[in-house]
Image (cartoon, rainbow, N blue to C red):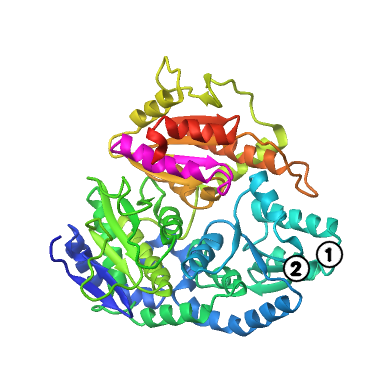
Amino acid sequence: MTEKEIDGAAGLSVYGARAVPGTAEVLAQLLSDGVPGLLAAKDPTLWGPEAEAESKIRLGWVDTFRRSRALLPQLEEIRASLREKGLDHVVLSGMGGSSLAPEVITRTLDVPLTVLDTTDPHQVSAALGDRLSRTVVVVASKSGSTVETDSHRRAYLDAFERAGLDDIGGRFVIVTDPGSPFEQTAREMGAHVVLADPEVGGRYSALTAFGLVPSALAGVNVAELLDQADELAATIGNTDGNPTLVLGAALGAAALAGRDKVALVPDGSGIVGLGDWAEQLIAESSGKDGKGILPVVVETPASPGATGADVLTVTVGGALTSGSVPGGGVDPDVSVNGPLGAHFLAWEVATAIACRVIGVNPFDQPNVAESKANTNRILENGAPPATPSFVDGAIEVYADGLAEGLSTVGDAVRALLAAAPEKGYVAVMAYLDRNADADTALLRAALARETDRAVTFGWGPRFLHSTGQYHKGGPAVGAFLQITGAVVEDLPVKGKPYTFGELIGAQAAGDREAIAGRGRPLLHLHLTDRAAGVRQLLAAFSGGS
């Protein structure tokens, strides 16, 4: 490992960023343009005139952690009230940033939290059947119109009523924007209501009520996260001693030079699951207008896909002892280490800066609505009939447009890998139960061994609220593997003319339409027996080990 410079402040260290080719020039330009001071002042002109209107109402994250302190007494009061009633099992219903931030907070600090960010009927049913009488449901949605969270709320209302439990409204904590339709619904329900910072978008909301409420109710001392962010925030406007500026410059410089994938690798030093949160932040912020930085979440430093000619290898972790080598076993281009609260702010700053460097608006998501519209249409009218290209064991294979003469699942997947363009990527999208079907995630590493293309993995439908933007709006170099599964026992959505099984089926079909409509390589595998299908699929690629 070569000697590389470390930029550090407030317990956060960024190792190696200045050695990334092009960073010095990008950094010099950012300083010449006065970017650090302008960002600290929340100047909306930083991303150009077309982005200015959106930026004006989306820069609250720069200092939201200070306003978030006002929530702490309310959260303590709600938690004490819930504990008095014996409600100690916290379930979070949220999508995208509103679920991913609390998940990394509670996993890192080893505090139990049930995260429900799916419409898979099996996973939803399992959650409903777990300690229902002791359950408090945190429903997190800026407007309340998110179909997944609305469906969860309806399912829990129905389950509480069927169980004959009292004070049903008091078993909900609603996190939403002030004045949203959901606030009115929540108050009519008799739910606890916590209002979030309205000038922060979902993917930048880790240190707002969306990140803090479920974490605090689960038992995390969230004041420590705010302290860590506050300490780092003092450096955002600096021209020197500003590690977040250097990190953003390196991400942007690498992308401009053709290294437009960033492998996010945990180094084992104390931060758990940060890659999943950073993935949605980077992908949804940067992936638009045919541009973008593709985050690739790599399981361990030894897993395939951590390096590549078009990949910037970034390891992440907590505190490192003096003399420790960043990376945990892989030689990183960049290593970021520090306390979790500082990580959240650092990656938000760095992502916003990188978006300026590559020339996109970090705060909009122009392509997210497309799959939602497709879903609604399919729920109303039904999906067009489709016949599998062939059936292999427990898997129906829909391979229209790929190579001719395919007869096995392995052949079909390898044909998809071959269809990914040079310096492109393969996205595995699993519309399954991420608990019961968890082994499906092993496919990412298995396929990464088969190809020199970057391979990502996402659970549907939650990735639609994050990397789904990159898939449609980013560079047109993706090849897509969608995996769906048979529904053995469906679950109705109370008050709606569809079930959870029909909803997740429509979401998957709507996403296929959005991808196929762009002429991008697509392979759809439907598991007629989920457990058998996952085993069969992994066996085709050396067991996925």
Q: Residues within 10 Å of mark 1 (few under 14, many from 20)?
A: few
Rendered location of residue 253, percent (x, y): 24, 57
Verify CB contact (< 8 Å) between mark 1 and mark 2.
yes
Q: Is residue 235 above or below residue 520?
A: below
Q: Residues within 10 Å of mark 2 (few under 14, many from 20)?
A: many
What's drawn in magenta, residue-wise?
A: 428-453
Q: Is residue 468 above or below residue 417?
A: below
Q: Which mark, residue 398? A: none
Task: Please give the name of the residue rendered at 48% of the width and 64% of the height, measured from the top-left corner.
Answer: 104
Residue type, numbered disc 1? Leu
Foreground label between 1 and 2:
1
Please indicate whether residue 173 sits to the left or right of residue 104 in the image. Answer: right
Label 1, secondary structure: give it: loop
Residue tagged 1: 165
Task: Please give the name of the residue rendered at 72% of the width and 73% of the height, measured from the top-left corner.
Answer: 192
Foreground pick, 278 / 543:
543
Residue tagged 2: 171
